[in-house]
Amino acid sequence: MKYAYLTRNVWVLSLVSLFTDVASEMLYPVMPLFLRSIGFSMLIIGVLEGVAEAVAGLSKGYFGRWSDHSARRLPFVQLGYALSAVAKPMLAVFSWVWWIFLARMLERLGKGLRTGARDALLSDEATPATKGRVFGFHRGMDTLGAVIGPALALLYLSMYPEDYRTLFLIAFVPGAIAVFATFLVRERVRTERPASRFSKWNFTAFAAYWREGPAAYRRLTGGLLVFALFNSSDVFLLLKAKETGLSDTGVVGVYIFYNLVYALAAFPMGMLADRLGMRRVLVGGLLLFAAVYAGMGLASKGWMIGVLFFLYGIYAAATEGVAKAWISNISARQDTATAIGTFTAFQSIAALAASSLTGFLWYQFGPLVAFSVSAAVAAGVGVYLARVRLQA
């Protein structure tokens, strides 16, 4: 069969991610507005989001390693999606600072809990020759939720302006659908376990995989993490779009457009990676990122922003799923969740530094310098990955 690699588990996990992203992305554009409306200062918002992302990042590695050592995937996936679903309506109940912190931490903890185990389940459904397609299909469905979610939020808020609390309750519905769908996943019995030791009380033990894993893993993820240190939040791209004269609606519209391009291109890019090789597609994506960021520094018209966000969607489709597929091919099957979890944990930490660095460069020297530095580093990492000796 032509699409036999799109198994039941791949379809279910992809739909679970789609519904979860619908719920999450309904709230992403309005979260800062809601927090400001209940009295949070920009400083507290920054601390909240920084801590939340740190929790998500570190927990990806920790729970990924735990999943490998327990030889189980599904409990981590089910509990992770359940925590994220429950956390959303919690935001509508109370406005206490510590309650909001708890809700955000639970939501991010849920993401960290499920990520490595879910990606390992996807890897188990594929062969080395179909990893790109499987991960690409999943990324496409996941990102489609990032198109539907903000669109629903815009529609609702256009009818009921500033009714944020009701929106949090509505977001629980697709989140709950995702949780129930996880019970349709069928986990294969696994007998092999990592040879390394694991302590449930050592929350940074996953970092040891950096030494224990294959040399090819360190070379690949090392290059990707250098890139992550300069790959700042998309907020800066949206700010640049605003500077060129786009309205607030236009800025949100271009963000939805980017996610739509990403969603539609992810599966074809995964197929291309399986056919041409992971290296070529990933390197091409990094060079495209360099071109987009160089163009962002110089863009002065709305149509330029539209073209650059289109290319940015192609870059994301060529790198996000392909990177995970390549990592899963390099690492041993019993270490898949640890390998992906460790990489995504370090990637989350690097992303925090990247946004701080870009913000500093923008403040001191302007957007042209900020974007040019990121473009130069991306091009350098692309050249490095094109030449370094790697498997797959």
Image: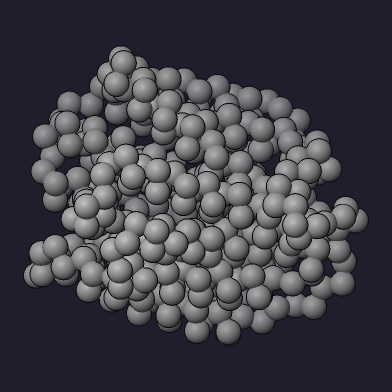
Q: Does residue 243 sit above or below 198 in this rendering?
A: above
The reply, left or right, for residue 70 in relation to residue 274 is right
Residue at 86% from the left image edge and 58% from the top image edge:
194
Give percent across and percent down for residue 195. Answer: 90, 56
Residue 113 lies, in percent from the top left, at 60, 63
| Horizontal side, residue 310 vs residue 151: left or right | right
How many numbered marks have been drawn onto this rendered protein structure?
0
Of 192 and 128, nearer the camera is 192
Q: Is residue 223 above or below residue 117?
A: above
Of residues 93 and 113, the one nearer the viewer is 93
Residues 224 and 351: in front is 351
Q: Quadrant of residue 298?
A: top left
Residue 46 vs 105, above or below: the answer is above
Residue at (26% x, 50% y) in the render:
40
Relative image position of residue 255 (x, y in whole percent): 27, 49
Asked whether 95 or 72 is in front, the reply is 95
Q: Residue at x 23, y 47 (%)?
A: 254
Indicate whether 112 appears above or below 218: below
Task: Quadrant for the C terminus, please.
Answer: top right
Q: Is residue 387 left or right of residue 271?
A: right
Q: How is the image coloured?
A: one colour
Do we see residue 382 in this rendering? yes
Q: Residue at x 79, y 69 (%)?
A: 71
- Where residue 120 sits: x, y (%)? 68, 63
Q: Residue furthest top?
A: 365
- Judge whether residue 283 can be spotted in this image: no
Q: Quadrant of the N terminus?
A: bottom right
- Determine whether, in the image, residue 282 is placed left or right of residue 130: left
Q: Residue furthest right?
A: 195
